[in-house]
Amino acid sequence: MTTNPTTTTGSGNSLENRLTAVLPGDVDFASARHVAERGTHLSVREGVVQPSMTGHDEGVMFTIWHRGGLGYGATSDLSDAGLASAVAAARRWAIDTAGHALNGDGFSGDCPLEHTVGEFESEVVKPVKDVAFADHVDMLAGHESKLGANGDKRIVDREASLTFYDVESLLVTNGGGRVEQLIHQVFPDIRVSANDGGNTQSRSYGAGVFCGQGGLEVLDRHGFADAAPVLVEQVLELLGAPNCPSDNMDLILAPDQMALQIHESIGHPIELDRILGDERNYAGTSFVTADMFGNYQYGSELLNVTFDPTVTGQVAAYGFDDDGTPAKRTSLIAHGILQRPMGGAVSQARSAMAGVANSRACSWNRPPIDRMANLNVEPGDSTLEQLIEGIERGVLMETNVSWSIDDSRNKFQFGCEYGRLIEDGELTTVVRNPNYRGISATFWRNLSGVADQNSFSVMGVGNCGKGEPNQQVRVGHASPHCRFSDVAVFGGAL
């Protein structure tokens, strides 16, 4: 694996050697985390190739623990003087915060981090770089043109886009730790909107969740090449569809909607720093409390949720979190019982609770905090057809269009792009503006069916925001279709 830390800036030594050399040896723990991220966004809209956007963001975050104090110093100045200045800032903060840590019972403030050695790289089958820039644009133009191919004047907006990220990181410590990671991510999207009088409807390629790690093979996982004609057919179908009925009924959520449901009503509530109160001023708190783990019935016996950064091809796959903790698959909810929170090494030390390797930062200029990574609802043993057959009256919803959830991640309301009624065990009428609401624990306890591996989809979310100052990270979610009983379903605006 060859990454940017081999480049030279300032002296003739490699950046990696200079990072290691500048780390102080007279403190309890010191680390340097170098991150170089390159991103490219391509888009074709209404038959017009949009200006491409490319970016390169690079810098170093130094972390120092000493005598119970913690300090950070970050810089994009990779000269010897720039690195030394950032180390000095981190040292000053460590001195100033000594004795003022946010302590849990028995937490001394001493550094809980280790000097890890390892490396990780995304598996890539079809490298993005092997295809010429112009060919990417031509491919997008071809798919975008299919959105308007039938000439229907009710199609008022259409777009196809691709976003690529390459993220190189190197973490070195003053105790010989070295973790190198290279991650490749692909975010494809197709969207189309149609209007008829006062009625506007939209359909999209999973609302952005059909993303993943790897190369251009990510486009094949959810049928990107075949998506455009289906989306056009469905958006025009929605224009003439009746509004979703309002009543308590059974609900089946497709995997692309399950991604948001998992994210908001399982992921955020069980992040440990949130439970400890760190996010209350900005993103809110959680209805989950520390005493719930090991005994709280979060969902029905069918609910099994894992934290698994080792899933090949999922957006937040990695070998180590940004504190250097090795990542491994961990059960968070087993047969409906809440098992453990998502908290990294620091939150684990503060709370005296077991957690996971989920200390993550969005960039070089942010410290790692507790974040979701790959958070998945495990498949069950029913076919999708069996889930549908078990419903007398209900609705199947696909693709998120809106979401709202309270500060404690408890009461929520979600809207979807596309719905189909289920009557006497069969899919029937298409309905528009389908919405549902609930309370997190009640909703998951009403989980009455989980589809099998054939329905299981590996997806992700690219814009999860949290932290002060704000950090936006990319998160993985995977799920099959799931059925819920006695859900408040309602139609949106007519």
Image: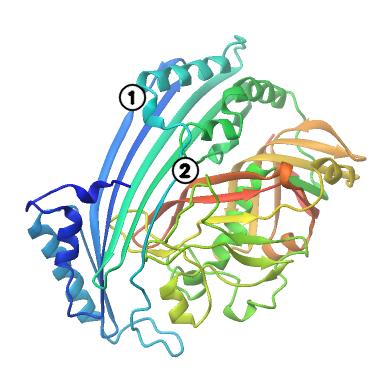
Tell me the quarter of the image containing the C terminus: top right
Q: Quadrant of residue 362?
A: bottom left
Rendered residue at 11%/49% (across/down): 9
Position above or below: 60 against 331: above
For residue 123, the mark is 2
Residue 134 position, x and y percent, is: 36, 18
Say which amino acid is labelled 2: Glu
Task: Please tell me which residue is depicted at 88% across the width and 46% down the height of the picture.
Answer: 391
Q: Farthest residue in the bottom direction?
A: 106
Q: Which mark is residue 89?
A: none
Task: Measure the C-alpha gap from mark 2 to mark 1.
Answer: 30 Å
Q: Earlier in the sequence, mark 2 or mark 1?
A: 1
As drawn, the label of residue 51 is: 1
Q: Nearer the viewer, residue 338 or 198?
A: 338
Compared across the picture, whether 373 is left or right of 377 comes to left
Query: As shown in the figure, which amino acid type bears the numbered disc 1?
Result: Pro
Residue drawn at the location 86% of the way across and 44% of the way down: 386
